[in-house]
Image: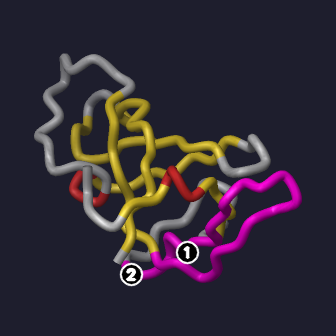
Amino acid sequence: MLYLSIQIAGFVDPGRQDLVACEFTDAEGRRHTLEDKVPLFSTETLPAKLAFPRPGIVRCQELQRWRDAQGRELVRVSTGRPDGVVSMEGLSEFTVLAKAVSSAPE
């Protein structure tokens, strides 16, 4: 199991403190937004008056790892496995810099 670092941007609906929007940037500089329940992204309790953004993680599965022509270490991950998390565009596979992925939650 791997963990992709994300930023918890805030509550989807201020009246509901169980759903949050999270963001991360892929290796091409494209920003992706994920929305789901707090426990999928953080072990913290997120009170209504908490300052955002907050660091978070999403579990993912590594699909491929390589170095590109610029020498960057890249990882293709699926957030669809194991928790079924998809982006607002319906995507679950992303290529990210290897430093954005860890083997333990931070």
Q: Which mark is residue 54?
A: none
Magenta extent? 61-82
Instruction: Point out residue 60 in the picture as x, y percentages from the top left corner.
Output: 44, 71
Q: Can residue 90 be seen at all in this image of the molecule? A: no
Quadrant where the image shows the N terminus = bottom left
Determine the residue positioned at 35% across, 52% down.
57
Q: SS class of the residue under badge 1?
A: strand
The structure's colour scheme is secondary structure
Kindly identify the amino acid type of the residue bearing the numbered disc 1. Answer: Ser
Q: Residue 82, which numbered label?
A: 2
* Residue 23 in picture, x, y percent from top left: 52, 41
Question: Quarter-wise, where is residue 84 in the image?
Answer: bottom left
Q: Classify 3 as above or below 13.
A: below
Query: At which x and y percent is residue 20?
Result: 36, 42
Residue 74 is one of the magenta-drawn residues:
yes
Image point 62% across, 67% down: which residue?
A: 75
Disc 1 crowd, CA 10 A, few/some/many (<14, 14-19, 20+): many
Q: What residue would you read off at disc 1?
A: 78
Picture residue at 33% right of the left edge, 67% below the top: 103
Helix, strand or loop status at disc 2:
loop
In the image, residue 95 lies in the stretch drawn in magenta: no
The residue nearer to you, when weighing 94 against 91, is 94
In the image, farthest residue toward the right: 69
Left or right of residue 94, residue 22 in this image = left
**Disc 2 to disc 1, C-alpha distance:** 8 Å
Q: How many labels does the image show?
A: 2
Location of residue 67 with respect to 26 vertically, above or below: below
Residue sitting at x 56%, y 58%: 98
